[in-house]
Amino acid sequence: MARITLENVKKSFGKVKALDGISLDIKDKEFFVLFGPAGAGKTTILNNIAGIQVPDEGLVKFDGQIVNLVDAAHRDTAMVFENYALYPQMTVYDNMASALRSNLYKKDEDYINKRVHEIAKMMSMDYLLERLPSQLSNGQKQRVAMGRALVRMPKVYLMDEPLAHLDAKLRNAMRTELKGIQAQFGTTSVYVTHDFMEALSLADRIAVINEGKVVQIGTGDAIYDLPINEFVATLMGDPEINIIPGKLSKEGSVYKFAMKGSGREYELPVDQDLFAKLDTLGVKNVDLALRPQHLRYSFESKPGYLPCTVYSYESIGNKSVIVAEIGGQQLRMIAPNGLRVKIDQDVYVDLDLSHSLFFDSESKDFMARYNEAEIRRIAEPEEEG
Amino acid sequence: MKSGPKLGTKILLNVLLILYAIFALFPLIWMVILSFKSDAQMYNTMFVFTPTLENYRIVLFTTPYPRYLLDSLIVSGLAVVVSVIVGVPAAYALARYNFRKKEDIAFQILSFKFAPEILVVLPLFMIYQKLRIYDTYFGLIWVYQLISMPLLIWVVRGYFEDISVEIEYAAQVDGYTWWQIFFKNLIPLIKPGLVSAALLAFIFAWNEFTFPLLLAGTNVQPITVAITKFLGTDTAHYGQLAVAAVVSALPAIIFALCIQKHLVRGLSFGAVKG
């Protein structure tokens, strides 16, 4: 159990800047998720915490103690590697027992036996214990890699995409399981993923990482509802959030939004806080962002609906996604399953603007959104007090 | 799609392989046959003759042949041991670490292997005379490193490169020291490559002729050089010569059979990588 702090950590590999001034404060017993696209530097952060790599600059602290010069063996972490890193010449049992047999974390064989079986049972892989890694499927290997970390009671669990190669059913089960394990052990965990569902469902807090920098840190709700810029907004959610460029104008006390693609002008629903904020910012060129669930469609013309054509229609199991197009602007929305939709047919779309977010068209930074105060209160409870 | 080659092709391939096998094996068979022939029957019989062990008796019990054999074993064996002790860490370094001129160094090591021995042997002869290591075990073992080390380093390096570095990280996180990781996790994984490379290095060292001929010859006499003694200036005892050759081939054959399991896999895997 430990609080882990990174202060302005920088790391380069040759000319490539992998980490460019990362500062994180991971609280004791927290489930902290590092989320970002491939190549963002998430794994490098993990390696720096584990002590596998040493930062070029900056400090890594465990409970306030600087551990930059402590080697990986003495940091008392347990890590799940993305490529499993199982020892090929050892059975699953020996793999899992490995750490408990090292001089540093030595336990007697009885304890090891009990513990390995306990964890194996929990991960429903006790029938695999006598096998060699080469006799396992990828999903099984991944579970063994997880199990190998979980047999220990380290200061911190470091997990690098531990569920990425599991099939969907097992992944959901393991997600629940993981959350339970973490709650039960209360061990600080740092979890790397590029799957926003995993990030949102597991995390106490999420750090969004991009190009070696921390973009935003916050609870899942905060990241989802109050993204700091368009990049974060588009990472979270599937189908992706709609980004609609346009122009803001004020007539009297009412704001209007002229959509660039269609040329249609919308009168924005009144929200005094929002309007006040837009007044102070005074930005005219904005991107209005709207989650797909806040778009309505109709196949018949209705007043106020925007006439578009169907660009694509994709069924994804329990729902489907319609992508409509107007003047080069694509609009994604969620529809029920089993519709008969043809490409290029007419579709009419209504935007529920009372859920929209506003980003500055130039800097792509977050400006304001509807119900901001209310959402902020829910999403950032601790920051309030 | 996967019907395999046609029957006719199969037969043709097998015939070709058999022809090649005969071509490759016949000299060896002929050598074994010769070793059982008496001098009297040497030139006037082909496959039908009265086998005799006389040649073996003469070579093994009346000449210092066993001593030559022992010299060869000492020199080749120790040369391989030194190569393993020095070469495995070198291969590890070349596989894992990035340092300046790394590829140049690796190539330099390999180039020892393809420089003709005769090219360097004369200067080496002078140096050995000066250093007083001419005609010593030490001197030969040293020069044999030119033969055994490059092979070992290149094969083992390929093996190290095939082991994902995360395995080492995982072991570090598990609380092991570098030495423990090296012996517990890495050595078992490179074993097939190490064994086959060491065996090949041993065979190359065993077969080495130029270096022992010119850098040794009195105190230390490896078998390859010593065999020439059976070819007298006036008489050629082909039977004894054949015995000497047959016996000298045995250690390599025995070793190869013992680790046959590792050999094919060991060389086809990892080693092929550039």
Image (cartoon, coloured by chain):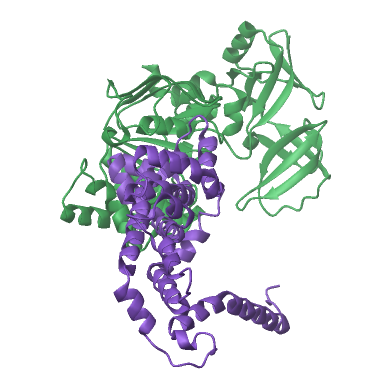
Chain colours: A green, B purple
Residue found at x 39% / y 88%: B52
Q: Residue at the front extreme?
A: B234
In the figure, is residue A193 to the left or right of A308? left
Residue A195 appears in the figure: no
Res B258 → quadrant: bottom left
Quadrant holding the N terminus of chain A = top left
At which x and y percent is residue A303?
Answer: 79, 32
Quadrant holding the C terminus of chain A = top left
Residue A356 appears in the figure: yes
Res A353 → quadrant: top right
In the figure, is residue B125 to the left or right of A183? right
At which x and y percent is residue A85?
Answer: 41, 48
Observer-nearest of B130 and B36 = B130
At which x and y percent is residue B179?
Answer: 29, 42
Res B217 → quadrant: bottom left
At which x and y percent is residue B68?
Answer: 34, 63
Residue found at x 21% / y 40%: A104
Residue B24 vs B39, above or below: the answer is above
Observer-nearest of A299 and A146 = A146
